[in-house]
Amino acid sequence: MDRISALRNIEEALREFEAGEADLEATEKRVIGVLRTYATDFEGDEEGLRAYQAVGAGRADGLVVVADSESAARERIADLLDEPVAEIDVDISPV
């Protein structure tokens, strides 16, 4: 899914919510689904960029970031969680 398709799907979900055709829970699920699909289909404009997901225990589990390597992904996750890289005890794998 490209960025434009993702934005259109999110806009449609919001329109349905505003029109009362969907409740907040359904809208959240739909938007999360669009975002997850976009992240897993992500192909960066810059060569080497891809989506990586943290898998393991703790707050990092399930986080998806875009980076050019597993080590860069680990650093981005550490920055997002405001924790030292050494404390991020997860496996980082391409999505």
Image (cartoon, rainbow, N blue to C red):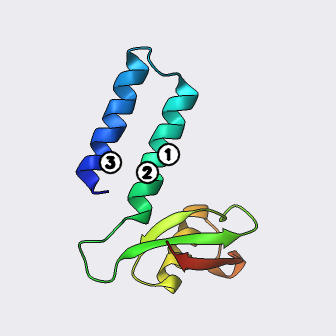
Identify residue type, mark 2.
Leu
Q: Which residue is mark 1?
A: 32
- Does residue 38 sit above or below 72 in this rendering? above
Question: Which of the 4 quarters of the picture holds residue 49?
Answer: bottom left
SS for callout 1: helix
The residue shown at (38%, 64%) is 41
Q: How many marks?
A: 3
Q: Which residue is mark 3?
A: 6
Asked whether the residues under the numbered discs 1 and 2 touch, taking CB atoms below 8 Å apart as contact, a structural biologist would say yes
SS for callout 3: helix
The residue shown at (27%, 54%) is 3
Question: Which of the 4 quarters of the picture holds residue 55?
Answer: bottom right
Identify residue type, mark 3.
Ala
| Marks 1 and 3, the one that precedes in the sequence | 3
- Does residue 17 sit above or below 56 in this rendering? above
Identify residue type, mark 1.
Ile
